[in-house]
Image: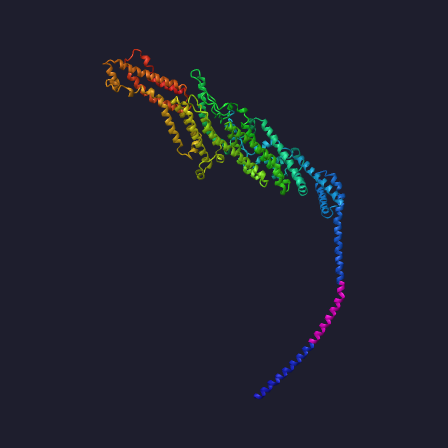
Amino acid sequence: MEFEDDRRRLVDATNNLTNLKKLLSFSSENCFKVFETLTKFDERLAKLEETVQPVYKETGNLQRQQENINSTLSRLDYVIKFYTVAGEVEPNIINRPNSPSMYEEYIRDLNLLAEAVGYFENNNPDSPELMNCGSLLEKGGQIIEQEFQHYLCRFTEDMRIEKILELIKSDCKFLQLVQCLSPQCNINLITYSIVYILQSNHFISKASMEMNEKSSNENFPIEKAEFFCLFKSVEKRAANPDKIVRDLKSLAEWLCLNRNQSFVHLYSKLRSDVLTRSLQNFRSFLLQSSLESLIKTLGSQLSPMLGGRKNSHLMKIIETSSKQLNDFHKEKNRNSFIRRKPESSSETFNIGGYNSNFAIPQSTSSHSLGSNSFNLENSDSLIREKEIFVYVLMITTLLKLAQIELNLLENIVPISNQKNIFSLLITSSLESIHQEGDQLSSRVKKAVQKHEFNSALNLLPVLRYLAHVRHHYDILLDGCNPSVLNRLHSLVVTLQTTISRTLEEFLEYIKSDMHIRVPKDGTVHELTCNVMLFLVHLQSYLDILSRVVTVTDIQSLELSGDKNSLAFAQYICRVLSALGLSLRKRSESYHNDPCLQSLFRLNNTFYILKTLRNSSLMSIVLLYKNDIEIDLMDQIRDFKTDYQRCWSKVIQYITDEDGFHSNPTSFQSYSSSNFQNGLKETRLKDKERQLIKDKFSGFNKEFEAVINAHKYFSIPDKDLRENLKQEHIELIGPLYHAFYNRYVTIDFTKNVHKYIKYTPDHVVQSIVVAFDDLA
């Protein structure tokens, strides 16, 4: 069995091997056939390549030749038009555009000429066509400049004065000035009037925009109404403003690309002249008009931001205090036939200089502020209110007109040239404003040399206004040349420096003043009045004082939340200290009359204290020196005590202190009742009668001397006068009443009226009259 199986497997394997050999042989035959086929295909491809290759190369060469021909024709056409463009556009260029509708075609021809000029300059500089095209292009460029200038001038004009006034009035609502200012009072005229652009962040009000919009074409965009006021009224109705702007813009764009420098100077010169003429015309109008008419025309109101209405109440209080001095001096002049008129002294000093109700008048007791103070109108250094008013108006006008010019510029000129042109455009007008500010500053410096410190007060509203509009000017001049940007900053610095130096000079003047003459009646010295009024006026500009006041205590200023008030408080303390030393030095002129010396210092110190209280300066000073009010009250108390010593000789005759203490039997050793009862039983000795006579005679003499001396004294403040009068009535009245009752029934003389001249009521009435006459 196993043998058979093995044999069967062998047969199967032999059969499989035979089949495999057959398949191998068949595969070899097929492989040969495929190889043979591929060999024939390769031979045929080689033959095809030999046939097609020459044709392909020839076709490529023909294509390149065609491209070269087309490129050459295109270049020829490009070059040929440059040689013919001059002849084609020359008639159109020379004949210039007859209407704005031809601007587009004219500019297109100019662009062709510009392209030809560029070609010849780069490829054939010696070509005669370059000269022809260049001359035509120059001629056309000049014509475009002329057309731009003519077109712009045709539709625009200098800003009319009426329009400028409308623009100024549109920035604020003047409602309260007429109610708060009297015709005689113009001390705060500048403060109350210069309020432009302070109540709005925009410089064209809705009312003004609506008015412009109504007067313009209905299709005119609102954002262009701001510069539309430059257009002539007739042209507004006859032309389409949108088309005017588009035509000007198309001309400006071509000029900026092809004649940039020439256009920059053309536009800046053209509009700068218009701006300058508008400002000059408005300035001439302001100078020819009276200040009152300008205020009435503009309808100004008090501005809290410029220290107007918020300080009117304290000015009224100071006016009341000053009016008391006025009334006193008038009364003394009317009664000059009774009392000797004191001679006025002379000092070269001026702070007032204002024609106001707040200034102390020149009078018998006031000290003349120097001969130049009475002729301030003829002083070249004097800065008048109208000058400041006009100057601030010019700053406002320049700002508004410059904004309108910038708006016009932005709608016509490409943005790349706007700031460069605007810098040139505004330079001349801005420089004139800067020069005028420098002139004002120089005049203040000259005035300070003459001790006319009031001029510095006139610069304060200008500085405040410049500080207020500085932001708007920064926005206006953003992107301009640095020299233009620095002009306004330089002006502000100049004014700040001038005011700061003036304040320091004022302080030094108080300290070093060599004119020590004083009023012979002991009234408030004019230096005191003017210094306090000066401080009151400075308070109106509290919001900017930290910029101009020299700070001595920097540490306290840094810790303070209100730097303006603290800086002003430090300055007030310095001024009061210098004033106190000056008054003490001046009071030494009364060395022959200690009573008048004390009264002089009492009057001045009381006036200082009252002014500080009534003007709210006290609340400011207390921020830095919290005991100043107590110090002043202590000084007043001491001066009162010193002044009352002039009555001591009167009092010593009616008190028991000077009795006969050495004589126990003297009538002074008894009480009044016992003495009078004793007189009924005993008769006075001659010595005792003489002592009583001496007492009455001494009292009469000293009392009359004091009363007569007071005829030449002055206590202008009603409160102080009443206070002193009541104190002396309470002091002398009871003493004399007891003295009178003690001796009136005693028979110590046959000539009673010779010694008993006054009854107690007469004494009191004499004191009342004496103090009332000091009013």
Magenta-drawn stretch contains 50: yes
Q: Considering depth in this image, is 701 or 720 the residue closer to the camera?
A: 701
Left or right of 190 on screen, residue 516 = left
Give the x, y percent position of residue 728.
35, 22
Magenta-drawn stretch contains 477: no
Q: Considering depth in this image, is 412 or 16 the residue closer to the camera?
A: 412
For the N terminus, the quadrant is: bottom right
Left or right of 512 on screen, residue 425 = right
**Whether residue 586 is visible:** yes
**Whether residue 407 is visible:** no
Q: How many marks?
A: 0
Which SS does the magenta portion mostly show? helix
Give the x, y percent position of residue 547.
49, 36
For the C terminus, the quadrant is: top left
Give the x, y percent position of residue 233.
65, 33
What are the residue bounds of the magenta stretch?
31-55
Residue farthest along the top direction in this orientation: 750
Q: Quadrant of residue 578?
A: top left
Left or right of 284 on screen, residue 373 = left
Q: Considering depth in this image, is 31 or 210 the residue closer to the camera?
A: 31
Give the x, y percent position of residue 471.
54, 38
**Which residue does the image show at 67% across and 77% down from the upper left?**
27
